[in-house]
Amino acid sequence: MNALGSSLLAGALLVVLAASPFSDLRASNYGDLKRTAAADVIQAESCSTLADSFGEVANTARETDASYSRLLDMRDLGERLHDGCREGIRALEALAGEDEAALENLYRSEDWYEVNRALATFRYWQAWLDLSLSRVNPDERARVTDLSRARRGFEAASLRILYPGLVYGSWLGLAYVDQADGREDAARRRLDLLSEALASDPDNPLLAIVQEERRMMDLRAGKLLSPGEISVGELFTPATARLAEEQAFVLLDQHRKTEVGAIEAARLLRRLIAQGFLDDRLLARMLAYQEEIVGQDLGVISRLLEAEYAYAYEQYNSTVLKYRAFLAGGGNGLDLTLYPFRYHFAVSLYQINLVREAQAVVDELLKTPGLSSQLQSALYKLDFIVAESLHQGRPGEPQATRMREAARRYIASAPDDPDVASAWLALASVASDDKSRAEYLAKAGSDRRLRENIRRVELDAAVSAFQQAHRDRDQQGARRAAENALEQLQSLPRKQQQQLPLQVLSVQLRTALVEEQEGLLEDIAQLQTHPDLNASQARVLIWSQLRVLDGEESGDALLQFVAGLPQGGENAPLDHELFAFLRELQGEGRYDRLAALSQQWLPKLETQPQLHRQVWFLHIEALREQGREAEALVASRDLLAAHPDSGNAWRVLAEQSEASGDLFGAERAWAHIAAAEPEGSPLWLEVSMHRLRLLARLDAADRGCKLREDIGVYNHLLEAQYQQDLQSLFRDCP
């Protein structure tokens, strides 16, 4: 059941269970009930009041979306109260003894009626708690058990014909159980029967709930409500807000199938948000429809939805920008639990290498009280990852100390996490003595994935130095580090050296040393057929192979290797490393080599559009950097022919056409780009100014004057330089 209707349900379910005439005991809160339940025997005359009080706190827990543990504890409380009252009944029977007249009077008394109502009421509310448990139980199989127990409880309560409130409430509960079981038709029949039963009592609060639930079922079946049914133009009531919300999400479901409905759904959601119905639950539902909602105007909450959309697609730069916009627009002032989203923000900051900022967000979150255990564990893990990154980026004792602290917190918070062995390995890497290192390595050894890493821990310093030197394009430094690491590797026992990870490492190190490359290609080829080779090791071997081939004196070996790749073949490790090698050539300014290799590779990538485009971009850049403008223009046209929907391809063509003197072609390309952008947007203004300058060079006054007029509408949005250019171009326009 939707939380928007929970308060209405709460009132109704409590109303139909009339208060007990016994008022000498009133358990005012949960704590009072727990203290009362501690007794083995509860006085029978108190049970009715206790049952009603238990109903109040149980329903409050359901209404406020209490945690699984709280719901479970409350159900146990109901059991203890029930058992205590049952012993109270037995005590009353014991007082009557064998006197049949006394027993007959007891069984016919109002007290006996109320006590038995109380016992039934405890079971009734336990069924509602079971229904709630079935929705939040972390164990999927246990949820089935909870739901089955709820059904049995409601079925038993529905037989208590002396207590109509229990019967009607149980029928409603059984309808919700049927819904949870996916038996929508059965749920509808129960609601119809309940509606008929309550028809003679139009003021019964349950009737309104039943009618609302029937409308909700119609909605979920695709029968949309008319505007009048959800009070368009008026303030929502809790009931109409629930209907409006459900209609919004039915429309979003429609949009998934027909691409129609998102605008109307957004209008309803915008009204709900404006009227204060936005809460964590509604936000969670909206996040489930990110694809449909993103782009719709929902106020500041749109920025948060856009941030989460970007995060889901690992667009971390966009995530950071959108989340910052959300905060700047007043997001912190919303009554929402933002901690999970701040965690995503921290992850995104880390992913775009804003590690210090990520650290600040994590530190702030870790100071926040009341975090869920799951989120806190995730934060401890991220804190360790961030600390490890800072240490790797700038090794030193302050960073090492922080990494130790973060690793220990992570281990303490999640000792069974599948990745926790990496924290033990990190501790080993900065251990100050052999005893500690051995202890940490032994604990890291619980993760079989780290077996090879563990054996290499003594090599880490030299290997890290080699990798850093390579990243810095420090050939001399890489040679020195490779020599050091290879020396350490060769000092290990022969048996260890023959292990596959260390053989692969040896190949990588030998690649950096000219004097160690004899027979290296043969060793690489042999290792590439090893049955235990994993993806990471395969990439290292390809990394080595490419560089050894590139170093052959003839210079043709690598070109022949690329030419021999299968047509349309997809080899992720090879593709990754070959593209990385091309980027390395780009960084080194070896454009002749880049042009030749990319030209050889392009025909092989026609079935991989994304990689195909990226290699095309590198190829065109290489041609341009060599001054081969005509070839670059032809290549730009070929790129566009292969990827006509690529905005970047159109931009490359526009830029290259202009560079090659084809001003007409350049203007046409910029015009195509502009047509795909919202008029007045920053990109549209930038592209349109490109067009205007080209039209001026082409002396195309008619088109230039029209474009100048179109741009002038947004003069207030233009940068100062653009404003100056706009004033200077086509000044004679009418």
Image: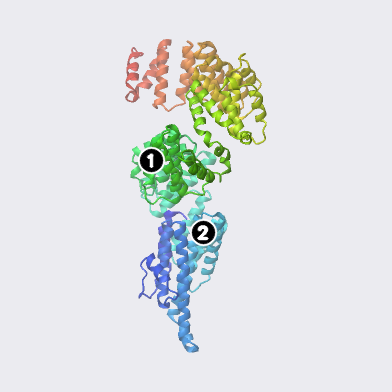
Q: Indicate which disc residue 361 carries.
A: 1
| Residue 180 figure quarter | bottom right
Contact, mark 1 vs mark 2 (Cβ under 8 Å)? no
> Is 346 or 211 nearer to us in this picture?
346
> Is 115 or 589 nearer to us in this picture?
589
At x 53% / y 11%, what residue is drawn? 630
Judging from the image, the colouring scheme is rainbow
Residue 622: image location, x then y, percent: 52, 16
Name the amino acid type tagged 1.
Answer: Val
At x 37% / y 36%, what residue is drawn? 325
In the rendered image, the vertical position of residue 242 relative to residue 82, given as above or below: above
> Is 404 or 373 nearer to us in this picture?
404
Q: CA distance from mark 1 to mark 2?
A: 42 Å
Residue 76: image location, x then y, percent: 47, 65
In the rendered image, the vertical position of residue 1 relative to residue 297, given as above or below: below
| Residue 357 figure quarter | top left
Q: Indicate which disc residue 176 carries.
A: 2
Name the amino acid type tagged 2.
Answer: Tyr
